[in-house]
Amino acid sequence: MTRPNKHSEAYGAFFSRIQIGRRFHDPTLQKKLIEVAIPLEAINAASAREKSIRHGHPSTLHLWWARRPLAACRAVLFAQLVDDPSSHPDQFPTHEDQERERQRLFAIIEDLVKWENSTNEEVLERARAEIRRSCGGVLPPVYDPFSGGGSIPLEAQRLGLPAYGSDLNPVAVMIGKAMIEIPPKFKDMPPIHPGIKERSFYRNAEGLAEDVKYYGEWMREKAWERIGHLYPQVDLPKEYGGGKATVIAWIWARTVPSPDPAFADVEVPLISSYTLRNSEGQEVWLRPVIDKANKAYHFEVDSAQNVRFDEDSSSGTKTGSAAFRCILTGTPIPAKYIDDMASKGRMGRRLIAAIAEIKSSKAYISGDRVDLIYQEQNIKQLLSSPDIAGKLPQQVCRGTLPATLRVEGMV
């Protein structure tokens, strides 16, 4: 056995206690499979694999803390509702018979928790049939009073169970509505968009999904027509094959004059971390190149594919909760100094990196390689547009943006 996954182990123990408590008050209730055993190894493996799944997983809809693995919820719901073979000594009189039947149920769970079988009706129907057999021929409702990310109601619904959920957090309620409440209303309905249909037959919420995809692309095209010119393309470094690509993120750093008297005319960055991507084995980070003699510095991009990642060297210029160091000389930059510079309007900004979209990946480019002249022109054009002009406060601001800036749609 592998080490139990904390989610599957906790869920199993929790629901097992519920079943034992119910039978304490009503001894006629049948003992459920979860009270005896479940195939933890298969559940752990499937739950761990979910972390690397992106396409089609609820986590891509909205991140939610402590999201429960779908595989663990699906397995626990099944094991909580299906009778353990020991509850039917008339059908399984010996220990060997019970163990044989238990292994058959384990095989259903092992198929059920695989991500590839999430929409496999044959696998799901086998599970539903077992639940019906243990629940008097009906699929009982499931209610999760603290639904959060919606894993339990979603998996209950997948198993054909009437699912209900509630939560005090409005974000959790919105997630639940998007995943659990709205899609069933369009079950087996074809899409309504005017474009070419992707298939002739639609089951479950496939028609709704196609409509969402179609109108999402339509909205993206309309948005690009209106503001696409504000997202110019940049030249890709040769390591990315050259050419041009659209920037999806600009990474800036605040700057202050160096507190070192000999370098007081140099704006130095306040950077908490040089890391641009922290996926294990695929790290990307900025490497500062210092030219102390000319009072200059610039950034290059390194990746774990070419250089061994060193967490210490990517820690930026931050030295404490609100303290930094000069990138050129190492002179401490205390919080009070930063506050004074901001109050005097001497806090600046510097583009340190840009992230561009290339095919199914991303390109990480040093800010020193980006032509900022065109960008500044776009910013001026945006600020002079009728939607924004006249709404910006004119007073001197503390820092890089006015503290009172509250332009609708921007902040």
Image (cartoon, grey):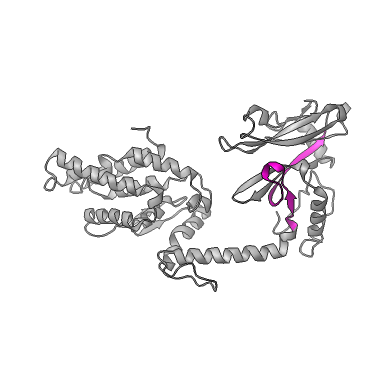
Which quadrant would residue 220 be assigned to in this image?
bottom right
* Residue drawn at x 68%, y 41% as measured from the top left: 239
- Magenta span includes 375: no
In the picture provided, is 88 more to the left or to the right than 294?
left
In the picture provided, is 113 more to the left or to the right than 397?
left
Residue 398, given in percent of the width and then of the height, sits at 80, 44
- The stretch in magenta equals 230-257
* Residue drawn at x 67%, y 63% as measured from the top left: 223
Task: Pick whichever, 400 or 191, lies toward us.
Answer: 191
Residue 304, given in percent of the width and then of the height, sits at 61, 34
Q: How many marks?
A: 0
Q: Is residue 144 visible?
A: no
* Residue drawn at x 61%, y 66% as measured from the top left: 218
Quarter holding the C terminus is bottom right
Residue 231, given in percent of the width and then of the height, sits at 72, 55
Q: Could you tell me what secondary structure mostly forms the magenta stretch?
A: strand
Which quadrant would residue 343 be assigned to in this image?
top right
Q: Is residue 263 above or below residue 386?
A: above
Q: Is residue 78 visible?
A: yes
In the picture provided, is 7 more to the left or to the right than 195?
left
Q: Is residue 386 above or below residue 10?
A: below
Residue 288, given in percent of the width and then of the height, sits at 74, 32
* Residue drawn at x 25%, y 39% as measured from the top left: 36
